[in-house]
Image: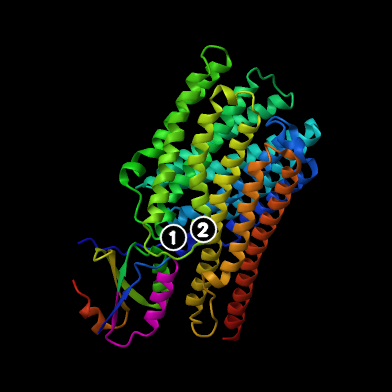
Amino acid sequence: MQVSRSSLSLEQAPPISVPFRFFITAPIFGLLAALLLLVYGPEILISRWAPATLALTHLITLGFLGMIMCGAMMQMLPVLAGSPVPRVKPVATAVHGLLTIGTLALAAGFLSGITGLFHLALSTLGLGFLIFIIAISVALIRIRTPNATIHGMRLAIASLATTVILGLTIGAGFSGMTSLSQLIPLTDIHLGWGILGWIGILVIGVAYQVVPMFQLTPEYPQRLTGSLSWVLFAALVIWAPLYLAWGSGQLPKWVPDTWILLPTIGYTLFAGSTLWLQHKRRRRVSDITLLFWRTGMILIAACLLLWLTSLTPAAKNQPAIPLLLGIWLLFGIAASVTNGMLYKIVPFLAWFHLQNRQVALMSMGKVKVPNMKELMPDRLTQRQLYAHLATLFLLTLAPFWPNPFSYLAGLGLGVSCALLLLNILQATRRYQQVNQELSDFESSR
Amino acid sequence: MEHKLDVSGLEPPEPMEQILQAIESLNSGDYLYVIHRREPRMIYPMLENMGIAWITRPGGPEGYEIFIWRKDDRIANAKIPT
């Protein structure tokens, strides 16, 4: 019988300020996105190419989703794989600062058309992601016995690198720094790698660990975990040149469009497995994270149906359909899943850091460490879930009836992000209070 | 004496909370037998800091069995099933 005494060194876990700065910044970008919807209203939902639409998209992808995913990855690597990110404090400071400036500059660049803002955005985002990708890659390469989650993270980071390179290329063309002949296909490939590669493969890899762990479900079947991420990645590698060949007139559009069905079906299989595992979970208590995840998984299947609808002749000249697809992919799936995860990660980290310090000080019975529910009460997270679902509903109607639903969706997004921010700040404040009590105990000894 | 603790149906970090609580009530010669679904790697540094010994074995009814006792408690140590 194998005996294990392996341990996770405390020094490996980054300080709580590393992930929390990303988690607190994310809903602030969400608030900016809401403000944009309220100011520009229906104009944002006329076409996916409108400058305000591009600004909104990047506030959500870089500002909201990117912040949460970068912060979570820096935290999860040492916890899930025992491989810390090298020089995590300066890396986190640089990445957070550069991505914040870059995202703001990019959104402002789209809205104003000022070339200097694009230059600032491209240099800061390029450098920020370069530092992030190198630091995370070092931690990922150091892992000797990678599991399905680590394979997923490696493929997700490769997808992120591809997304960033394409984004920088498109940005340079958009701002007139270089000439770009295939703007539309390159943009679609950029978002294909961003959504189906970076976001999608990372969510799947992380789900293999966190769904069974936090939602008390059976494990994902090995047939799925062993191959799905690789199949999705390989499908994207093949799809990109097919799509470029369509862009240059060498292939009909149905070829890349049919090929992209392969990863889409793969994602639907993942969604179906997750819903099935959630159905088989051991403890049938209401759980906010589970409801966020369930929303995301149902919308994966809905996106497949919407994608198939978009291929029919009747849908050809309907600009609302690609907009709705983007809304469901980014807000309905990615934002739901990441928002739900925050309600596990934030209170868990706060509890873990306090509990560690309590044990180190041997202050058990003297200072009470709050549990997860006290750090992140259900009544607060439930309220935000309702605001999120209402926003999703309003955003679903908005492409078809931009007036008044773009304004109402902006209002909903503002309320949802404000509540999310307040919930994270509330947990942070509670953490700081108890941490201070522990400091007082330490100095009184 | 063995104190059995089944944390296999609990969501993190409740298993950790319950294990830490149970350790406080261990008397001389007692050890804790924990039934778990996963290897609780995050609790090990805390146990180390508390002067607690442990041994984790894959197996048991839910996937992992962890035996926990005070490092200086030789009687408890001798009782740990091999």
The residue that appears at 66% across and 44% down in the rendered structure is A395
Q: Amino acid at mark 1?
A: Phe
Q: Which mark is residue A426?
A: none
Asked if residue B1 is positioned above or below residue A29 in the image, the reply reads below
**Where is residue A428 shown, x and y percent of the image?**
63, 66
**Where is residue A21 shown, x and y percent of the image?**
64, 57
| Quadrant housing the C terminus of chain A | bottom right
Q: Residue furthest front?
A: A314
Instruction: State how many labels appear.
Output: 2
Question: The numbered mark 2 sits on a residue in which chain?
Answer: A
The quadrant holding residue A162 is top right
| Quadrant housing the N terminus of chain A | bottom left
Q: Say few, some or many: other residues with alpha carbon within 10 Å of mark 1 (under 14 / 14 to 19 / 20 or more).
A: some
Task: Identify the residue under disc 1.
Answer: A214
Give whichever of discs 2 and 1 has the lower sequence position.
Answer: 1
**Where is residue A332 shown, x and y percent of the image?**
57, 45
* Residues under numbered marks 2 and 1 in contact, where contact means CB atoms less than 8 Å apart: yes
